[in-house]
Amino acid sequence: MIAALSVSSGRVSAEDDDGLRRLRLSGQLAALEICAGAGGQSYGLEQAGFQHELAVEIDRDAASTLRLNRPTWNVHEGDVRDIDGKDYTGIDLLAGGVPCPPFSVAGKQLGADDERDLFPEALRLVREARPTAVMLENVKGLASARFGTYRTSILEELDRLGYGADWQLLLSSEFGVPQLRPRFILVALRKDKFQNFVWPGPVGSPPTVGEALLPLMGARGWRGARIWADNANGIAPTIVGGSKKHGGADLGPTRAKASWLKLGVDGKGVADEAPSHDVAESHIPRLTNQMVARIQGFDSGWQFSGRKTSVYRQIGNAFPPPVAASVGIAIRRALGASRRRSEVPMKVVA
């Protein structure tokens, strides 16, 4: 653990302010991540060479997932409003997947009028911590014309604070993820660094759903796995995580389920395990959570904590790690940090 934490007056503060110095002496860059979820962005940024000084997540199961995968990370299970940015002054990167309800269709698109909008908290942390770089991810709804004034106000505030910034809509499928999954991303850097930033370009065609899932679909000896994979020859519709207010795990609304069915997948629920050897070859399978994670760009190195529906929601709401890795590498390059051999965009593997 890099910095021990204490709680006073409702705010989390760092007792050990030597963490940043130790990271920089080791050649790593330090990140403060808010709204970390189940770690999609966290995992990708790690691949890009960022070490977490602190990860903040309010959901109990998602916080447990972070601890499960990285026991040495400093995970604060609580509200981002508890964090005092002054304790992380000069950190290299402030990152986060701020909640999407204010800008999504499902969330009624209330924008700045929605109390769940945490962009103001992110900007507060920018003012307090003065990070060298900022990376905030959201749904494509924020890119719509109705939120133009809102986006401009954020850019103006960042400019006032001394940052150059830009929004970009990235398609996860262009970074090796077998689903379209558009994500709207804000990157800001100190003005002396921003001129060096270049958005990452496509890394190639993604695997099809069948290619990505064949090893998992055939893990229990289902004889129809190969035929199924050959027919599942497209990319997936965007995975929908949903919220605790809705029912159990399924693969999205009616239109999404119809798209899944064209790929040979029953989207009405999530299975506990892959089809066994005695299941008919003509069977239309459901995906397991492990399969859904693969569609989201997670490899087998990242596990999830919680019950079935909670795990599905964690996966479904995640930022695909390969996309986070690619943007993280672009930020690292702009900061002038050398690229280590291990810092390569992640690929979807079994």
Image (cartoon, grey):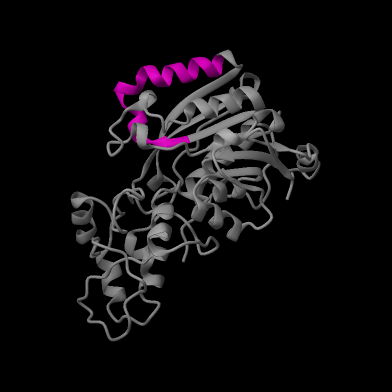
Question: Where is 121 relative to 18, above or below?
Answer: above
- Magenta segment: does it hold 140? yes
- Image coordinates for residue 99, horizontal then vertical, percent: 43, 38
Q: Left of 170 or right of it: where is 227?
A: left
- Quarter-wise, where is residue 28 in the image? top right
- Image coordinates for residue 159, horizontal then vertical, percent: 55, 15
Question: Where is 298 relative to 202, above or below?
Answer: below
Q: Left of 5 or right of it: where is 146?
A: left
Chief SS of the magenta region: helix
- Quarter-wise, where is residue 185 in the image? top left
Q: Going 39% across and 54% down the picture, which residue do you hit?
A: 313
Residue range in magenta is: 137-159
- Magenta segment: does it hold 10? no
Q: Left of 2 or right of it: where is 105?
A: left
- Quarter-wise, where is residue 280 in the image? bottom left
Residue located farthest toward the bottom when viewing the structure as drawn: 278
